[in-house]
Amino acid sequence: MVLLTGVIPGFRSSDREWIIASLGGVQAVRPSAAVEVAVAGEGAGPAKLAKFEKLGVPVISLAEFTEAAAGSSESEVRRWAASYPFATPDALAQMANDPDPTVRARARGHRNYVEAPADAAIGGLLAD
């Protein structure tokens, strides 16, 4: 089970369940031992974070959650991830070569996207 806590900018409450489900998870509604991972949004309550720590539930950042969404098998989730304001350069680089043209365009047009240098694109195949 996955629990999202705090405010997640650009993320509607109605999006939570289907994005989590596409990643193979189930949305939790409150901290418990059944929660496998918590995603801490902006302003996540200290008491709730302390409860996760007490329960031994790992807490991940929005960036880590976005990277997981970038690898989803659902193109709609990847489209969301490519548009997410806080998507990381690593997640965007992964999505820049996505088979879905909408995902590619959103990733490459994102303010955090960093194009790999030309020599990095060939994976260091040229020997010195």
Image (tube, rainbow, N blue to C red):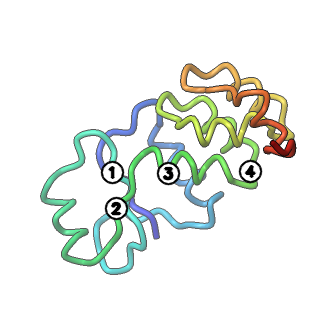
**On the image, numbered disc 3 is attached to which residue?**
65
Badge 1 element: strand
> Which amino acid lies under the numbered mark 1 shown in the image of this protein?
Ala
C-alpha separation, residue under disc 2 versus residue under disc 4: 24 Å
User: What residue is rendered at 53% in x and 35% in y?
Assistant: 87
Whether residues under marks 4 and 3 lie with C-beta atoms below 8 angstroms apart, the answer is no
The residue identified by callout 2 is 59
Residue at (13, 59) in percent of width and height: 47
N-terminal label among 2 and 3: 2
Residue located at (84% from left, 45% from top): 127
Furthest residue in direction left, as rendered? 47
The residue identified by callout 4 is 74
Which of disc 1 and disc 3 is earlier in sequence?
1
Mark on residue 20?
A: none
Question: Dividing the image into 4 quarters, which one contains the C terminus?
Answer: top right
Q: Which residue is mark 1?
A: 40
Q: Nearer the viewer, mark 4 or mark 3?
A: 3
Is the residue under label 1 in contact with that under label 2 (CB below 8 Å)?
yes
Near mark 4 (Cα within 10 A), the count class, few <14, some 14-19 or many ≥20, is some
As measured in the structure, the alpha-carbon distance from the residue carrying label 4 to the one carrying label 3 is: 15 Å
